[in-house]
Amino acid sequence: MQHLLRAALLAALLGALGCHRDPTWTPVLGVAPASGYGAASWPFDERESGVLARDVVTASTSDGVADVFAFLAYGVMFSCAAFWVWSHRKRALMEFAYDPRAPLADGPAVVVGTVEAPAGWDGAVVRIDIHQAGTEWQHKGAWHHAWKEQRRDVNARPFFLVRDDGVRVLVEPDARVAVHDAHDAITRHHQSQRTRVCDIKPGERVHVSGVVAGAQSGQAYAGAYRQGQGTPVVRAPSVGRMVISAEAPGATSLARMRFHRNWALALAAVFTFLCGVVMPEYLVLSATGQTEWATPTATDYWRTWRKPKNSSGYWVYHHAIQGAVARGAETLTVSDETGDGPSRCVEERQCAQVPFVVSSIAPAYHQFGLDPHLTTGRVVLLVLFCLVLLIAYPASAVASRPWYLHAKVNDTGSGPLATSRP
C-alpha cells in the first residue's frame, strides 16, 4: 500500500506542476467588428473538440469527477473512519472504566477474575482447535506457501471465575464463544496438515463479557457445576457471543481505535493535498469564479513532439489567447490555452469577446471557458488516488485485525511448506 501511495503522490506532483513555457504573444491586428461573436452570440460548445485545450475535460465532467472521486468518496471514507474511532473508543473506555471489585448486577456485564476449573477437571476449560491445510507453489523461481483453515473445533465447559473480592462466578460458555488470546501453539501432523490451538487454562486472568444472572436474587442453581445458594452465572447474550479474553480490558478496542484514527488522519492529509496541489484552481474558481468576457489582445501558437511507445511520433499543436477584462477602473490581463477554434476566430477578427472564468477574490486564478474545468491529468490523479484508497483502507482494516476477528484463519509465507513454522 505504501508503495502505491508513494507512486501516486509522485505522479500527482509531476502532473500538478507540469511543464511551463514562456509565451510568445502575437498581438491581434485590426479592429473586431461590432457584430463579432461575443457574450450575446458565442458560437462554440465546450463539449465539441477543438474548443478547449487538448488536455482539458469539459466542465460537466470536471464537476462529476470532483464530486464523486473527491468530495463523496473521501467524505464517505472519512465518515467511516470517524465512526469506527468513536465506536472503538467508546468500547475501550467502557472496559477501562469497569471496576473488577464493583458489585455484580444482573444484565450485560464484564466480569474479571482468575480461572478456576471445576472439581475433578484437569486441563483447559475452553479450547479452540483450528485445523489448517497447506499448499505450496513456485512463482518466478521463488517458493511460497499458504495455510488455509479447513475446520474449527470449539470445546468449552463451565468453569468458575474468582473475582478480586473473592466472589466465585460460574461461567457457562457455549459453542459460539469467542476467545481473545494468542493462537501460537501449533501442532504439525504431517507436511500439509497442522492445527493451531488457542485455550484458556486454570490460573489465567481473564475478563468475560456476557449476561449475568442471579447476582442478587440468591436463587439456587441446580447442576453438576453449580454450588451453593446464589452463585452468579454468566451466560452468552441472546444477540452476539460471549467473549473470554486473556488480553487487558480495552486492549483490542484501543488498538482498533488507533488504527482507524491513523487512517482518518491520512485521509484528511491526502484530501488536503489534492485540494491544495492537484485541483486548487478548480476549487477557487468553483467557489469564487465569475464568467467575464474579455477583449482578445494577443494569441500564441506552439507545438510539442510526442513519441509514444512503438510509434514514430507526431507533433501536437497548441493555441492560447490573451485578453483584457475591465473591472471598473481596473483592467485585468488574462490568458489560457484554448482549442484551435476560438484561437482561429480571434486571429480572423470574428470574435470580439472571449469568455474567461475569473476569481472575484484572486484574479490570478482564471481559465478560458464558461465554467471551471480540470485537465485530463488531474482527473486521472483524482481517480487514481480515490481507487487506491478505496481498496487500501478496507483491505488493511481486514488484514490488520487479530485472528479472532476473522471468519477463517489463513496464513501465507515465503518458502516451501517444509520450512514453514512449525
Image (cartoon, rainbow, N blue to C red):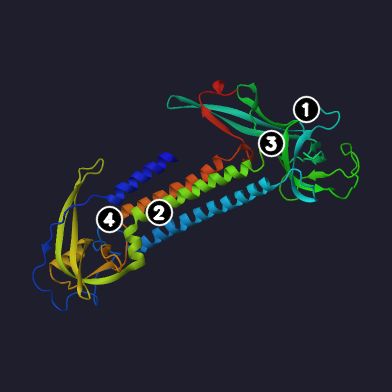
* Amino acid on which disc 4 is placed: Asp
N-terminal-most mark, 1 or 4: 4
- Structural crowding at the residue carrying mark 4, measured as other residues with C-alpha within 10 Å and reported as few (<14), some (14–19) or many (≥20): few
* Amino acid on which disc 2 is placed: Thr
Please indicate whether residue 232 sits to the left or right of residue 406 in the image.
Answer: right
Residue toward you, 323 or 317:
323
For the residue labelled by badge 3, is the local secondary structure a helix, a strand or a loop? loop
N-terminal-most mark, 2 or 4: 4
Q: Position of residue 186 (x, y in %)?
A: 64, 26
Question: Which quarter of the picture shows residue 251?
Answer: top right
Q: Quadrant of the C terminus?
A: top right
Identify which residue is drawn at 11% across, 67% down: 28
Residue underneath mark 2:
272
Residue underneath mark 3:
246
* Residue 130 sits above or below residue 96 on the image: above
Q: Nearer the viewer, mark 1 or mark 2?
A: 2
Labelled pair 4, 3 in contact (Cβ < 8 Å):
no
Labelled pair 2, 3 in contact (Cβ < 8 Å):
no
Labelled pair 2, 4 in contact (Cβ < 8 Å):
no
Identify which residue is drawn at 30% across, 47% down: 14
Please indicate whether residue 186 sits to the left or right of residue 383 in the image.
Answer: right
Identify which residue is drawn at 86% across, 30% down: 119
Mark 1 → mark 4, Cα distance in angstroms: 72 Å
Labelled pair 1, 2 in contact (Cβ < 8 Å):
no
